[in-house]
Image (cartoon, rainbow, N blue to C red):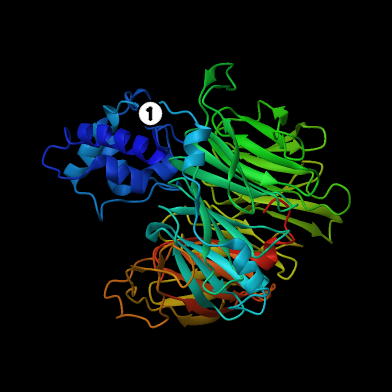
Amino acid sequence: MKLGKVLSLAACTVVTAGSLFAGTSNMDFPEVYEKECQGCHGPIHQGGVGSDLRPGALKKKERHVLRDAILAGVPNTAMPQWDHSFSKDDADGMVDWLMDWKDNTNYKLDFDQIHSTWTKLADREALAKKYTKSADTKSVLDITFATERDASLVDFIDSTNGKVLSRHKAGFAVHVTVTNKKNPRYAYSISRSGRLTMFDIAAPGQPALASVQVGFESRGLAVSPDGKYVIAGNYTPGGAVLCDAMTLEPLKAYDTSAVINMKGQIEASRVASLADTPYGPYFAMALKDAGRVYIIDYSKPDFPIVGDVPNIGEVLHDAFLNEDEGEDFGRYYMIASQGSDVMGIVDYKEKNLAAKVYTGKKSKPHPGQGSSWFNKKMGKQLHATVTMNQGSVVVWDSNWEIVKKIETSGGGLFIGTAPHTPYLWADTVLGKPATYNEVHLINKETLVTDKIVKVGKKEGQLIDAKTNKVLQTWDATQYKTVTFPESNPQIGKDKVVEYTSKVGDKVKEPVQPRLLHAEPANHGKWTMISEWTTGRIGIYESETGKFIKYINNLTTPTFTYSVEHRQHIPGA
């Protein structure tokens, strides 16, 4: 049976059960949960970024407290308010459905089923022969990828001028994009619905070349530095799938439906972060629920697991690599444990746990792309993460000692930097509505916040953090998004969506912008910041933080990825 058919059968079972609850509510709880909730709470309600919502975890809680958490949100967490789209009856019904939910999802990775979904969408070799150089930009290194989560789109943008080149349908809630550093004309995306897609960003319109359905719900993605392999990680069924990076043909499945967790029990585990490294022929594979990291050697026959690093912490999530100069460049895989409030330092060389960096009680570290840089004042390499539950940037050195904790105005998801900017750009997207429209620009030398980018409903501001003086203001008027239906591409078989830079009517009731994920672009000259709620990406000067312009007409933009910038970042 194909993966899609298995999923459909399971979904039908759950939808039928969902219709039994809710009183006067007509809400389809399984459908709403899949679209809005499972990204944080997991496909089988087991939690992760969000709380464990299985009946056993909820039975000690009062139903009215859970209902109020849905409607009003939970401050300083990823849980937003839902009173704009949930009635009281809807919230009560969702609580009933969650408390009576039955887990009927007992899946295992099946290599043959996965392989049967492998689809060729365009002729890679013919395109490479016809378009030897980038057709739509001066170089493929000029391109930045962006994901429009709720529109299920991957966008390709000329990051030297902000022009949107193409938009591709690539599966529900596209989560991550990466490029092939050895052959940077090839890019890959993974959606939360388990679709892995390969693109040729040198050909006109950046056509999709191939796709494969690696699971029902997926997250991580990594490409080997030699350009031969790409690996995608699954939440459901738990595991990872290794593919040929030039064709996307599946080569091996790593099943994690029965692994040993930190309590010594055997259970299924989701796979969270995946990372390659220039340090050796390795992929790191984080087992979210087992608290351990596998190290895969892709240079050997059958791509064996050659390292197993246990007892890192509860609820592993995202990670980044160190950038120490010399032989240790990319040696350490720094993985967030959100249930234990640590950054685990996994050593690729020794294949062990070198250290644990404690980020603070109930802090939940979430580095996103993370930051690693050389501090000239201190004369040493530093690394940083934001935390989800606290407005805090935690900085440590390569002796794995905390150097400083820098206060921000709310919990964050991403912190980024580059050699061309004097700042760490830390978002506060999980803070309260009054402050989740900020990005803090922290001086990499002094480790003090110098400036704050703050975007209101009608006006944006660049603020001096020490004096509160407004250094710049700009028009942040919100416009209705102009959308187009799906259509056929210039090349290949996949669906695309047209883009226009022409703005729609002014929004009568603008919303509070929610800023996240600062990504260096335009060869270090710009930094792009996504605005989740307003459907646009802001472009800022990397050196000064000054606003330049907006890319409008997007739907919930989240992750961005600059090809040129990431060429120099290990594991990115």
| Total labels drawn | 1
Q: Secondary structure at mark 1?
A: loop
Quadrant hosting residue 153? bottom left
* Residue matched to label 1: 105
Give x and y (percent) for residue 328.
85, 47
Q: Nearer the viewer, residue 182 or 257?
A: 182
The answer to whether residue 338 shows anywhere in this view is no
In the displayed structure, 445 sits above or below 390; it is below
Residue at position x 25%, y 38% in the image: 94
Foreground of the two, 458 or 211: 211
Q: Position of residue 124 (x, y in %)?
A: 60, 62
Considering the image in quadrants, where does the C terminus appear?
A: bottom right
Quarter assignment of residue 414: bottom right
Report whether 334 appears left or right of 87: right
Relative height, residue 63 to residue 217 (above, below): above
99 w.r.t. 436: above or below = above
The residue that appears at 54% across and 18% down in the rendered structure is 266
Amino acid type, callout 1: Thr
Q: Position of residue 383 (x, y in %)?
A: 73, 51
What residue appears at the point 77 percent right and 62 percent down from the top-left corner?
445
Eyeballing the image, is 227 above or below 141?
A: above
Please tell me which residue is depicted at 50% across the width and 34% down the height of the picture.
Answer: 112
Q: Is residue 429 visible?
A: yes
Q: Is residue 184 left or right of residue 340?
A: right
Image location of residue 460, percent across then percent down:
47, 76
Image quarter where the N terminus lies is top left
Is residue 126 found left or right of 532 in the rendered image? right
